[in-house]
């Protein structure tokens, strides 16, 4: 297994659709593609949609296949995971999807103000013991506000009731605009072609009979987003 991971990591280095950034490139500084993704990476000025914690990249690739007129970027720290989506996109010559290998903590170093049209969070680690590490915590949401367009939505799909309830509490505590909300996406028949895209982990959860939670919301309320009083 370790050899396979190393082989995949090495192969990812050869893909021209993957940007890998060391800490020294993004710690308290802007990445070279900051504000330039449409022009320099994709070569066309189209809406940019970002999937954070993209894992194997199924959602980024699925959306890119579905919407060829838009640009998609999947972000994850694990190169061996990114390998699957990056390889598929590379071999199929998909020009509207790319990947960034970096920690989400550095995400604001990659995108300029209003550069991103929407954000997807697909089955992120719920971080049950450390709220500040959740990708829907105020610390991360405030980072996203630095580059997400004011009307741009954030999508969360998760099997974790704890992460769902926590995110809902952040939304309500900060008076954020809640656009969609369900505790059983498939059971209630609320999926469309976009929400029906399934990641590797999502299919595992469905096979176990777990419901899938979904939230869609905006984060452009005035003032800093803060932690709810009751965590």
Image (tube, helix red, strand yellow):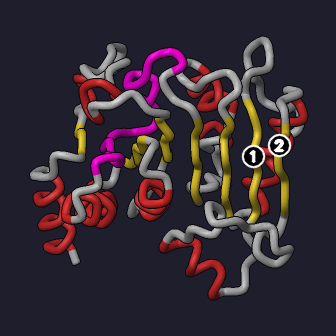
Q: Quadrant of residue 19?
A: top left
- 143 and 221: which one is in front? 221
Tag 1, which secondary structure?
A: strand
Crowdedness of circle 2 by 10 Å Cα count: few (<14), some, many (20+)?
Answer: few
Task: Say which residue appears at 23% left-offset and 47% top-offset.
Answer: 17
Residue 222 appears in the rendering: yes
Q: Give the numbered dot on residue 179.
A: 2
Residue 129 lies left or right of residue 228; in this view the side is: left
Please give the name of the residue rendered at 12% of the width and 60% of the height, measured from the top-left corner. Answer: 11
Q: Within 10 angstroms of label 1, few (less than 14), some, or many (20 or more) residues?
A: some
Horizontal side, residue 112 vs residue 179: left or right: left
Q: Give the percent coordinates (x, y) of residue 100.
A: 32, 42
Whether residue 80 is visible, yes or no, is no
Image position of 162 (left or right of 135)? right
Number of on-image labels: 2
On residue 55, which mark appears? none
The residue beneath circle 1 is 216
Tell me the quadrant of the picture where the C terminus can be found: top right
What is the x, y in percent for residue 146?
56, 18
Magenta segment, which residues?
A: 95-114
Residue 203: in magenta span: no
* Mark 2 in CB contact with mark 1 (< 8 angstroms): yes
Q: State how far apart marks 2 and 1 are (Cα).
A: 5 Å
**Of label 2 and label 1, which has the lower sequence position?**
2
Indicate the position of residue 106 as horizontal and vertical percent values.
Answer: 41, 29
Farthest front residue in view: 69
The N terminus sits in image quarter? bottom left
* Whole-percent x, y for residue 28 in the image: 36, 14
Q: Residue at x 56, y 32 (%)?
A: 117
């Amino acid at each position: 297994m370790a050899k396979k991971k190393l082989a995949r990591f090495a192969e990812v280095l050869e893909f021209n659709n993957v940007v890998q950034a060391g800490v020294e490139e993004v710690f308290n500084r802007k990445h070279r593609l900051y504000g330039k993704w449409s022009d320099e990476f994709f070569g066309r000025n189209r809406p940019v949609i970002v999937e954070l914690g993209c894992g194997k990249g199924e959602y980024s690739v699925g959306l890119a296949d579905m919407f060829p007129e838009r640009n998609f970027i999947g972000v994850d720290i694990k190169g061996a995971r990114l390998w699957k989506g990056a390889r598929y996109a590379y071999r199929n010559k998909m020009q509207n999807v790319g990947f960034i290998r970096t920690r989400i903590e550095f995400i604001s170093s990659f995108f300029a103000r209003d550069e991103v049209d929407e954000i997807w969070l697909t089955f992120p680690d719920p971080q049950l013991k450390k709220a500040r590490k959740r990708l829907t915590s105020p610390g991360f949401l405030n980072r996203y506000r630095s580059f997400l367009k004011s009307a741009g939505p954030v999508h969360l799909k998760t099997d974790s009731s704890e992460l769902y309830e926590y995110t809902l509490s952040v939304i309500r505590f900060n008076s954020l605009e809640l656009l969609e909300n369900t505790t059983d996406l498939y059971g209630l028949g609320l999926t469309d072609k976009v929400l029906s895209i399934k990641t590797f982990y999502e299919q595992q959860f469905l096979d176990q009979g777990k419901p899938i939670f979904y939230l869609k919301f905006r984060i452009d309320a005035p003032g800093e987003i803060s932690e709810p009083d009751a965590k």
